[in-house]
Image: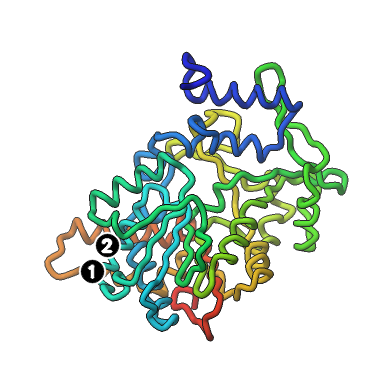
Amino acid sequence: MSDFPNLTEDQALRRLIRRRIASEGGITFRDFMAMCLYEPGHGYYASAREKLGREGDYLTSPTVSPLFAAMLGRQLREMWLLLDEPAHFAVVETGAGTGVLACDLLTWLRSAAPQLFAAIDYRIAEVSEPLRGEQQRLLNATGLVEKVRWQDSFSTDSIEGCILSNELLDSFPVQRVKLQDGALREVYVCLDGDAFREELREPSTPELAAYFERLGLLPGEGCYAEVNLQALDWLREAAAGLRRGFLLTFDYGYEAADLYAPWRREGTLLCFYRHGTSTDPYQRIGRQDMTSHVDFSSLRAAGEAAGLQTLGLVSQAQFLSRLGIEEALRQPEGAGLEEHFARRRAVLDLTDEAGLGRIRVLAQARGVESPRLTGIG
């Protein structure tokens, strides 16, 4: 039962956050963001409200069209062949949303690559109970639920196959910092009456300074920036679990020199609600998504420090084009105009360099001799 039975979810979450701030004298922006997104029973990802797709707050590539899964299926088939067609090929998807990618991917493999489908050991690592329920309902409705197993995090078993994430890392809570008079300061969230206000303080952890020291750069003077330490932890955990195979990371982001460029005065924090964007994280508490762009330079370096080989970093538009998504524009025999235009719209949406096409794809590998992936080039 809720501690606040007469309040709406967002009102209750706002009160919980205020209570914690009052108790601790201020919390880091990272802790504020974590409560907004993941607080049990109240946070954005901990609620059952519709989030993805045209009826939700934002679109992801799998919700646009099954063509995305089909191209990814082609890449997985090539990975399987590079691993000499093992009898058990693990695909570990972390943060699987509503399960539509798993559903479309397994559906395509069952039809187009039946030998690989038979070898697939599909696992979904999902911390959100409402999303796990949606995934299980969708896969059960399509008769694929027996092909999938769920886990809270990476299995301790060594993985041979592919670890996959799609727009996961940009949803992790981030520390916000600002370079002030040449010194790194961290954003804390405090109270001004019942309202939230920001305050710059000494960094809460020496990891923030170490992060920029590894990069050999700092944000510009007077600039805000986001630091996603959890993304690096996730990548190290993924690398530790990968015995042999590939790590594919799809996300919005840049190389560090672009992400922390001095002209990027306010950082990259964005909020999403009903397909609209905002830079104000203090409205619609628990009812809007919050994201920031990923630092691919640090992700690549973390993987290499953990023994992974970097295969390449490309845009999603390049990845899908190299795998042949334009073939979908050819009119299949017997297909009507409506299907043709639907496919055309999907291809354009998925490869639009101003939209989903600008998502970056980082490919890393372990234990694969001279791997060359068609999607990476």
Tell me, yes or no, whether the two marked residues, 1 and 2, touch with CB atoms within 8 Å.
Answer: yes
Residue matched to label 2? 107
Graded by Cα atoms within 10 Å as few (under 14), some (14 to 19) or many (20 or more), the crowding at tag 1 reads: few
Q: Residue 344 location in percent, x, y?
A: 30, 61
Q: Residue at x 29, y 57 (%)?
A: 146
Residue matched to label 1? 111
Can residue 359 be seen by looking at this rendering?
no
Left or right for 318, reference 348: right
Q: Residue 48 location in percent, x, y?
A: 40, 35
Can residue 245 be seen by looking at this rendering?
yes
Q: Give the amino acid at mark 2.
A: Thr
* Quadrant of residue 185 within the rendered picture: top right
Left or right for 249, reference 141: right
Q: Give the amino acid at mark 1.
A: Ser
Vertical order, 46 against 160 (above or below) = above
Left or right for 318, reference 226: left
